[in-house]
Amino acid sequence: MRHRVKGRKLGRNQSHRKAMFKNMAASLIRTLDQSEDLENAPAVAGRIVTTVPKAKELRPRIEKLITLAKRAAQHEENAAQYATDAERGSDAWKQWRNSEEWQKWTQAIAPAVNARRRAFTELRDRQAVDILFDELAPRFADRNGGYTRIVRLATVRLGDAGQQALIEFVGENDRVRSSKKVSSLAVREESAAPEEVEAPEADDAVATATEDAPADVSEETSAVEAEASEESTEKVE
């Protein structure tokens, strides 16, 4: 029976896998910080290149952290009504510190503090935690899941020819249909549609047909009708 064997081994033991995914998650989040002058920084922020199995294992870990940060943001908003703008250590701050507002603020902010501690245990990087709660949580506030995407790359990894892929946050560099393509498509649809022509009514059609008919044709038809009537009378006799 396959008890406690969920996920991919990736040729590593448990402690090695945990350390590897912590570093990968922190690296992916820290790429959003443009203040750092990293030598190996990716060309696009919020993106790293790895193998396909690693990207598939990293994706649920990252998305759970973002969901945790979004839930913490709600508690921070609720606690903001009990907070104070006074400088820490001032008389006003000390007065607020000894009031009931501080008690309410601590109770309201406690879940958010717990969420930051849980995120730190998964990342072990304070800067990555700050970016997660301060940038990613507001960015995906109106999105329910699906915060990352995995795109396979055509080039393989040198050495073992491993299939490579990039994992990145959605919302940036998304494919959007250009206005030129939309306008050209609309023009094609209009040109392909047949023009509707109003058909004349039956009485009008007959009247126009009789009016437009030439005189010779009317004479021929009257002669044919006369011959047919004569033949019918002969047969009756």
Image (cartoon, helix red, strand yellow):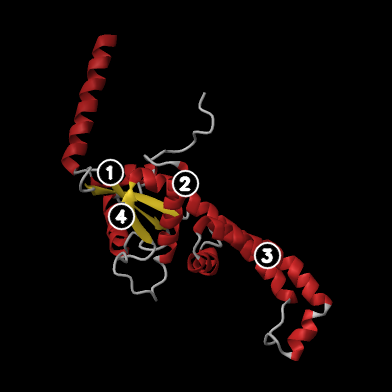
Pick the quarter of the image with the C terminus: top left
Q: What amino acid is at disc 2?
A: Ser
Q: Is residue 164 above or below residue 1?
A: below
Cα distance in 3D space between marks 1 and 2: 94 Å
- Which residue corresponds to mark 3? 75
Give me the residue at 44% from left, 49% from top.
Answer: 58
Q: Are marks 1 and 4 in contact (CB under 8 Å)?
A: no
Outermost residue to the left:
216
Q: Are marks 1 and 2 in contact (CB under 8 Å)?
A: no
Cα distance in 3D space between marks 1 and 3: 82 Å
- Which residue corresponds to mark 1? 209
Q: Secondary structure at mark 4?
A: helix
Give me the residue at 73% from left, 75% from top.
Answer: 81
Q: Dividing the picture into quarters, in which one does residue 31 lie?
A: bottom left
Q: What amino acid is at disc 1?
A: Ala
From the viewer's perspective, is the residue at label 1 or at label 2 nearer? 2
Q: Earlier in the sequence, mark 3 or mark 4?
A: 3
Cα distance in 3D space between marks 3 and 4: 53 Å
Q: Earlier in the sequence, mark 1 or mark 4?
A: 4
Q: Residues within 10 Å of mark 3 (few under 14, many from 20)?
A: some
47 on left or right of 137: left
Where is residue 169? Give x, y as percent: 42, 59
Question: Which circle marks residue 190 in the picture?
Answer: 4
- Which residue corresponds to mark 2? 15
Q: What amino acid is at disc 3?
A: His
